[in-house]
Image: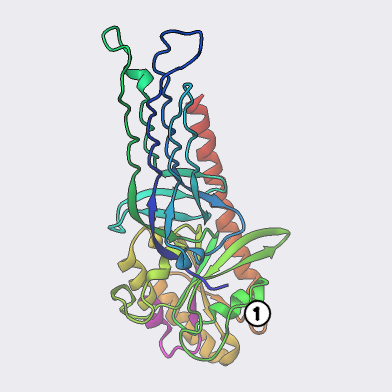
Amino acid sequence: MKFLDQAKVYIRSGDGGAGSVSFRREKYIEFGGPDGGDGGRGGDVWVEAVDGLNTLIDYRYQQHFKAKTGMHGMGRNRTGAKGADTVLKVPVGTQVYEEDNETLICDLTEVGQRFRLAAGGNGGFGNQHFKSSTNRAPRRANPGLPGEEAWLWLRLKLIADAGLVGLPNAGKSTFLAAVTAAKPKIADYPFTTLHPNLGVVRVDAREFVLADIPGLIEGAHQGVGIGDRFLGHVERTRALLHLVSAREEDPAVAYETVRGELEAYGHGITDKTEILALSQVDLIDEETRVEKQAALEAIAGRKPLMLSAATGEGVQEVLRALMRVIEEERAEEQAADTVDDRWQK
């Protein structure tokens, strides 16, 4: 399935049905009076987060969504039926923005969350509403109110526990394939990964979700290369795994390049706990390992882990380090939710 994380859609709620002009006519009732029913309310447009979706590809082939018009009122005080609603089903992690693509309308982070994007128009009053002591036979009824319409942006941000960042060809896809059942494209040229990939990691009978995004290069925040448009997929993660390839002539420069792009992007990514690892160490000798590990430690201020997804060296140590950070974050979130529940009670 092709990955699509952004789509523009047009929505329109249903118009309200018109009220009816009708009079009661029965054989033994001399003055029947008005009995025109009200029009039905137009259908609403909703967005709902559902399980089983991980892309917005459905909205590439259909961009217009309209709810049904309410039924018109009828005689004998019969109110028209409400128009059918339209529901946009999206993956968990989808955000809805106004047409300017900047004003956030809603953020759906849990399965089953719903939000009404456009309310249907109210139905018009039938002539029974206009009966009075001086107007016993009104011959007027209201039309239904029009629905709402808008162009909106849907933007998907994958929900994962940890995210992989680094330069192209840093070994991110190889690592994801080695520790999960995901099958990302792997090749010896830059930008092999063109869209984010997700995988479930199992370590010591515990699990977490790992996200791999396309590599960053200098100037990505200005649109160079694939740019930084996929960084939104690691905004929600609890930890980052920063891979620096041992094939880099100067690992310190590679590290600073990626950190600079993360800082330029913002949105709190640089505040996340970062696990640093020197990857692809099976391609260099022991002496070079020591040199590059020292250079990376000097610039990062902490000793990087040694990692080779091809041979399995250091993989479990990296996974356990990520698991510790994720469990700490989960515990803090659970404690915060417990405090909030107590205050609400």
Question: Is residue 345 among what the camera can see?
Answer: yes
Q: Is residue 242 magenta?
A: yes
Q: Residue furthest front?
A: 27
Q: Report which quarter residue 178 is drawn in.
A: bottom right
Q: Amino acid at mark 1?
A: Glu
- Residue 314 visible in this rendered orientation of the protein: no
Pointer 1 residue: 313
Q: Quadrant of residue 126?
A: top left
> Measured along the vertical axis of the image, is residue 313 above or below residue 272?
below
Q: In the shown orientation, is residue 268 left or right of residue 214?
A: left
Quarter of the image where one finds residue 35: top left
Task: Give the camera-side residue of 14 and 193.
Answer: 14
Name the element at disc 1: loop
Residue located 37% across and 72% down the image: 228
Q: Quadrant of the N terminus?
A: bottom right
Number of disc labels: 1
Task: Name which residue lies at 51% across and 86% down.
Answer: 246
Extreme-right residue of the structure: 205
- Seen at 57% across and 65% down, the residue is 210
Residue 284 on the magenta segment: no
The reply, left or right, for residue 116 in relation to residue 145 is: right
Q: From the viewer's side, name the closer residue of 67 and 306.
A: 67
For the residue pair 269 and 221, the one nearer the viewer reads as 221
Q: What segment carries the magenta color?
A: 241-256
Label 1 environment density (alpha carbons within 10 Å; few <14, some 14–19, many ≥20): some
**At which x and y percent is residue 286?**
58, 90
Place of residue 345 in the rendered image (x, y in percent of width and height, measured from the top left): 51, 24
Q: Position of residue 176 (x, y in %)?
A: 60, 74
The percent position of residue 158, horizontal first and vertical second, equals 50, 61
